Image (cartoon, helix red, strand yellow):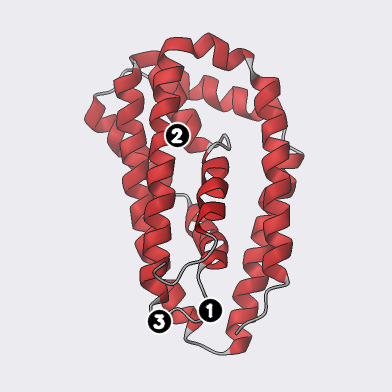
């Protein structure tokens, strides 16, 4: 569909990847726990807008990369695979202390208006260069080599990824507001979830490294 393949695998993988604890999710949890689910929702919407910027920027870059030589493609492929492996290994070796300290520091910030929280979420996402690199490394695996418009396919997949991310982020905002203590008590579960998804990242990195340019 629109030059993509394995769309259900992409959706499932995207949902799993969105569940990985990181700066965005910690910000949503902290704002929801301190100011209610509406504050967490405002942060989530800001993060979603930041993601759209990354999607469109990456789509333009992807078109240029795919139109260049095989050498350039190989360089991008190796960098992308190395980045995915780096994320996977980092998640597998992750510890609870880092997430707990980050959440504690965010939770101590003063109350903000929903508008300022929205901007905070947007800046947290848009100023993270790893997000842009992630899209260039992950999304192309689900674009058909013979697609007539790879940029359009990239944008469509990016929008699907962002929509799924918004569903998860708002669920996280609501659950954090009404059950923050329970969420904090489940750090061990989150740790093992990190390790499981880290294995998924490693498999994606290996798959990308073995991909041949058509």
Q: Is residue 90 above or below residue 146?
A: above
Q: Residue 145, labelled with which disc?
A: 1
Residue 87 appears in view: yes
How far is the residue under mark 1 from the one under mark 2? Answer: 30 Å
Q: What is the x, y in percent for residue 41?
A: 33, 28
Residue placed most toward the observer, 173 or 121? 173
The nearer-to-camera label among 1 and 2 is 1
Residue at 69 percent of width and 60 percent of height: 205
- Name the disc covering residue 168, or none: 2
Q: Residue at x 37, y 63 (%)?
A: 155
Earlier along the polypeptide chain: callout 2 or callout 3?
Answer: 3
| Residue under label 3 | 148
For the point 62% across and 13% down, which residue is it? 185
Is tag 1's residue or tag 2's residue first in the polypeptide sequence?
1
Q: Position of residue 113 (x, y in %)?
A: 24, 24
- Could you tell whether 170 is left or right of 20 in the image? left
| Residues at circles 1 and 2 in contact by the CB criterion of under 8 Å | no
């Amino acid at each position: 569909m629109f030059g993509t393949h394995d769309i259900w695998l992409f959706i499932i993988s995207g949902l799993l990847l969105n569940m990985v604890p990181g700066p965005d999710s910690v910000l949503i949890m902290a704002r929801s726990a301190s100011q209610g689910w509406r504050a967490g929702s405002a942060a989530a919407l800001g993060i979603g807008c930041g993601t759209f910027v990354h999607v469109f920027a990456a789509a333009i870059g992807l078109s240029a990369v795919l139109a260049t030589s095989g050498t350039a493609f190989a360089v991008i492929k190796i960098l992308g695979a190395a980045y995915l492996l780096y994320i996977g290994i980092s998640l597998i070796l992750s510890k609870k202390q880092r997430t707990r300290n980050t959440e504690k520091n965010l939770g101590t910030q003063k109350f903000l208006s929903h508008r300022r929280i929205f901007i905070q979420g947007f800046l947290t996402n848009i100023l993270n260069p790893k997000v842009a690199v992630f899209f260039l490394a992950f999304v192309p695996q689900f674009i058909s080599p013979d697609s007539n418009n790879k940029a359009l396919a990239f944008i469509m997949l990016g929008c699907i990824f962002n929509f799924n991310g918004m569903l998860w982020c708002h669920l996280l905002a609501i659950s954090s507001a009404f059950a923050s203590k329970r969420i904090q008590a489940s750090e061990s579960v989150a740790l093992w979830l990190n390790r499981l998804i880290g294995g998924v990242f490693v498999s994606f990195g290996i798959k990308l490294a073995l991909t041949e340019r058509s």
